[in-house]
Image (cartoon, rainbow, N blue to C red):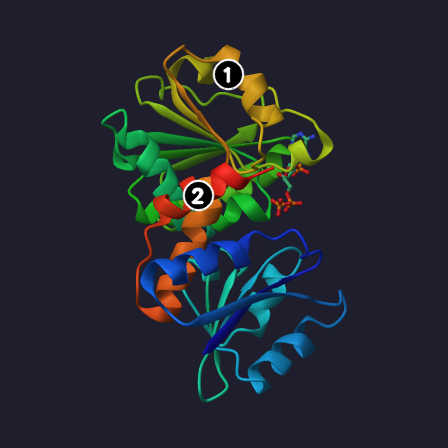
Amino acid sequence: TDRYAVIGNPIAHSRSPWIHSHFAKQLGLDLDYGRQLVPLDDFVGTVRAMQEAGYKGANVTVPFKQQAFELGDVHSDAVAFAKAANTLKFLPDGQIQTDNTDGMGLCRDLSDRLATKSLSLAEVQVVMVGAGGAASGCVSAFKQAGVKHLSILNRTADKAVELAQRATSIRLPAWGGGLLDFPGDLENIPVVLVNASSSSLKGEVPTLNERWYSGTVLAYDMMYAAQPTAFMRDIGPRLSSDALLSDGLGMLVHQAALSFEWWTGQRPDAVLTLNALRTILT
Ligand code: ATR
């Protein structure tokens, strides 16, 4: 039985073991996926012990994604851009290969939702709120998915400008500014508005320049909950009546599916698992 685990601190409430078990059951694979609490001062020791114990890989969550990058030996483009990893593959020779599936997981869920409006990511601009770890983890995936333009809005504008410059350096057209700024000249491209800020953790909601709202076809919060999130409740009434609203549960399931496929070579049906998870979410 191949062993995997999600590692982080805190970890008790992680849905990943449930999700990966659901994938394994779908595909009839014999796979053991657990969860492990990592002491805040011993990420490296924990990973080395897992390698010793014969684990094949791990998912890494808060607050260790940067340390996962530093410990890794071979990185995907997404990891190299974000300098953060959420997936580790332990190779037989002791080396650690890393990936960051958060961004592509987000893009898969966005694509599924846009498809209901006969749109693809290549036809939209993404307006992303936040310029921290969660935001930078998605930039390389937006480039790969062919997003037309990325605007990054952040409470601290300088951080958005800097992240936008880095996006431009990988040839993704991008602009950065403050929450209330507007770059102009982008009015005719449908907007996918993504909340990648951690404001919801404090029950706060970012207020943006009005001009974003009329063009928004999909507003997406990376956070998820059994009930609509604060961001969804706040933004809903500002958008046109046919705009789509979503929380980030699909991103969670799709990033897991990408990790699962990278480890096992088999692709689970993420939407099947997402629908099942939604029904048990409390
Ligand atoms: P994460 O890994 O979740 O991205 P982070 O790297 O600490 O965490 O980044 C948090 C992001 O949420 C930042 O962009 C932060 O804005 P600042 O750069 O100005 O700090 C944003 N954020 C946090 N609280 C916010 C709030 N109440 N309103 C708007 N943005 C907020």
Task: Name the residue: 40% across, 58% down.
Answer: 23
Picture coordinates of residue 142, whole percent (x, y): 37, 44
Task: Name the residue: 41% across, 72% down.
Answer: 30
Give the mark nearer the N terminus: 2 vs 1.
1
Frontmost of labels 2 and 1 is 2
Quarter of the picture holding the C terminus: top right
Left or right: 143 as drawn, with respect to 155: left
Left or right: 226 as drawn, with respect to 103: right
Examine the rendered structure and indicate whether residue 214 appears above or below residue 42: above
Task: Using the rendered view, name the quadrant where residue 172 is placed.
Answer: top left
Task: Using the rendered view, name the quadrant where residue 271 is placed.
Answer: top left
Q: Secondary structure at mark 1?
A: helix
Answer few, some or many: residues within 10 Å of disc 2's Cα (few below 14, many 20 plus, some between 14 and 19).
few
Examine the rendered structure and indicate whether residue 246 appears above or below residue 271: above
Q: Amino acid at mark 1?
A: Gly
Q: Amino acid at mark 2?
A: Ala
Residue 231 visible in rendering? yes
Task: Name the residue: 73% across, 32% down.
Answer: 202
Residue where numbered disc 2 is placed: 276
Task: Name the residue: 69% across, 78% down.
Answer: 45
Picture coordinates of residue 50, whole percent (x, y): 60, 79
Residue where numbered disc 1 is placed: 236
